[in-house]
């Protein structure tokens, strides 16, 4: 149970800090807010990678968990339990964030959003963006953490966090950037409206991307010694 709880805590931190930054900075209102939000998500991953990486591997993302499972890194049971606890962690984080926003002085906050995702240019565009970006992100995760890929796994947390910053810099304009079903489910439950209507995109897209990354990595992964 420790590794499952670690995934809950890690996903809570990622969702709370990443979406919290988006809310506090009014993400999308100007370039600085977009960059700040991207950095927040990336640094949250770096922090959690070095906090719970030795316990659970620090997936904190169902798409990553699916990719690791398809590469034989975890069992089917762990795959399902990881995803469950990730979603729970994200929901708890969204609940806390929603509580903070709802009890704040309206004049003191830029937005009352919860950091939820939405397809700004339609669901087709959103689906393509989420599949492509998640594929690239999970591919970095699989490569950086592989024990057959030289000494790269020594710096996996940094590589993964920095790549997530890049992913957000590209994706925020189009979808708000999910590449993580759990991170999208939690805020959408409290945001409602369009966030709930588009939620399927942010579940299906990242999972498809995670699966594609697994197949790509299998094709290019170094042979085990």
Image: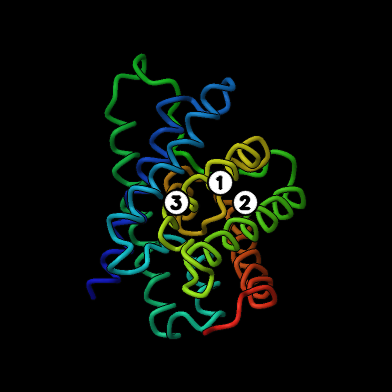
Locate residue 14 relative to residue 149 in the image: left or right: left
Q: What residue lies at 51% left-to-right and 83% top-to-bottom?
A: 72
Kindly indicate the quadrant of the structure image that contains residue 71. Answer: bottom right
Q: Residues within 10 Å of mark 2 (few under 14, many from 20)?
A: many
Can the viewer see residue 1 in this picture? yes
- The single residue placed furthest to the left in the displayed view is 2
Marks 2 and 3 in Cβ contact (< 8 Å):
no
Question: In what element is the residue under mark 3?
Answer: helix
Q: Is 218 placed above or below 114 here?
A: below
Q: What residue lies at 67% left-to-right and 75% top-to-bottom?
A: 215
Residue at the spot of label 1? 195
Residue at the spot of label 3? 189
Instruction: State the CA–CA distance, disc 3 to disc 1.
Output: 8 Å
Q: Residues within 10 Å of mark 1 (few under 14, many from 20)?
A: many
Marks 3 and 1 in Cβ contact (< 8 Å):
no
Instruction: State the CA–CA distance, disc 2 to disc 3.
Output: 12 Å
Q: Position of residue 63 (x, y in %)?
A: 53, 65
Question: In what element is the residue under mark 1?
Answer: helix
Specify the label residue 198 is tagged with: 2
Q: Position of residue 136 (x, y in %)?
A: 64, 57
- Looking at the image, which is closer to me, 205 or 147? 147
Question: In what element is the residue under mark 2?
Answer: loop
Locate residue 115 relative to residue 56 in the image: left or right: right
């Amino acid at each position: 149970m420790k590794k499952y709880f670690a995934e809950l805590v890690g996903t809570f931190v990622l969702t709370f800090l990443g979406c919290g930054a988006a809310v506090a900075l009014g993400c999308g209102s100007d370039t600085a807010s977009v960059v700040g939000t991207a950095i927040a998500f990336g640094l949250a991953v770096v922090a959690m990678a070095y906090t719970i990486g030795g316990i659970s591997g620090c997936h904190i993302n169902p798409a990553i968990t699916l990719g690791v499972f398809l590469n034989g890194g975890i069992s089917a049971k762990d795959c399902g339990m990881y995803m469950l606890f990730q979603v729970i962690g994200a929901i708890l984080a969204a609940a806390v964030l929603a509580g903070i926003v709802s009890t704040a002085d309206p004049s003191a906050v830029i937005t009352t959003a919860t950091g939820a995702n939405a397809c700004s240019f339609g669901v087709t565009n959103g689906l393509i963006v989420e599949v492509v970006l998640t594929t690239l992100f999970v591919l970095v995760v699989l490569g950086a953490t592989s024990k057959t890929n030289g000494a790269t796994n020594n710096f996996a947390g940094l590589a993964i966090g920095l790549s997530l910053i890049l992913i957000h810099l590209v994706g925020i304009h189009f979808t708000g950037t999910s590449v993580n079903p759990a991170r999208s489910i939690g805020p959408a439950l409290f945001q409602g409206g369009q966030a709930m209507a588009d939620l399927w995109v942010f579940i299906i897209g990242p999972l498809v991307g995670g699966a594609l990354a697994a197949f790509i990595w299998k094709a290019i992964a170094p042979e085990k010694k």
